[in-house]
Image (cartoon, rainbow, N blue to C red):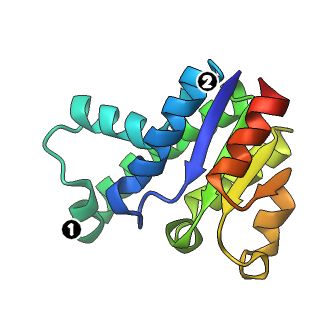
Amino acid sequence: MNVYLSGGMEYANNDGGDWREELQTFLEKELHHEVFNPTQKSRELFATKYKNVDFRKLKFENIERYTEIVCELVEIDSEEIVKRSDYVICYWDESAAKGAGTKGELTLAKYFGKPVYLVTEFPLQDIPGWVLGCCTKIFRSWGEVKGFLINEIK
């Protein structure tokens, strides 16, 4: 099974890497699932192709170049969801709510029939209806989603 880890990056601490790394370890070790971690993949792309680029600074100094790189990231992530992922786990927090990528990823997953498992502590009425409409199941904690995955997804 292949899983895509969706959630905020642009406005998240450590680009959303902390929760993704922890969940990735669980998914790989406990379930033996292949994980697409967009934080990790973005870092790999920047380390190889854009070594000396201050990506966040580009948004203010060279919006055209910034947009070109974002387009590349959108292509990589979209292709992963559509062509390789069996399901998506989304962490909905303040950074996901503020950005746009998570909403787009969930829409793609829904359209292409990929289950979306949302993990959030937000009151559900504070989450956009569109996002809720893309979700297969909603969990209130990491423990809940992990238990579900162990019992239902193996």
**What mark, if any, has residue 101 been given in the picture?**
none
x 71%, y 33%: residue: 82
- Quarter that holds the C terminus: top right
- Mark 2 residue crowding within 10 angstroms, few (<14) / some (14–19) / many (20+): few
Q: Secondary structure beneath disc 2?
A: helix
Residue type (three-letter) at the residue carrying disc 2: Glu
Q: Quadrant of the N terminus?
A: top right
38 vs 141, left or right, is: left
- In this rendering, the answer to whether 120 lies above or below 83 is below
In the depicted view, which residue is nearer to us: 131 or 146? 146
> In terms of secondary structure, where does tag 1 sit?
helix
Amino acid carrying mark 1 in the image: Glu
**Separation (CA) of disc 1 from disc 2:** 44 Å
> What residue occupies the far bottom of the structure in this picture?
126
Circle 1 residues within 10 Å: few <14, some 14–19, many ≥20: few
Task: Relative to 64, say whether 38 is above or below.
Answer: above
Identity of the residue furthest to the left in this view: 52
Q: Residue 138 in the image: x percent, y percent?
A: 79, 57
Residue located beneath label 2 in the image:
30
Visible residue check, residue 34: no
> Which of the 4 image quarters holds residue 44?
top left
Residue 125 is situated, as x and y percent measured from the top left of the image, at 79, 81
Provide residue 13's location: percent of width, then percent of height: 36, 62
Name which residue lies at 59% across and 49% down.
6
The answer to whether residue 113 is seen in the rendering is: yes
List the residue tagged with mark 1.
61
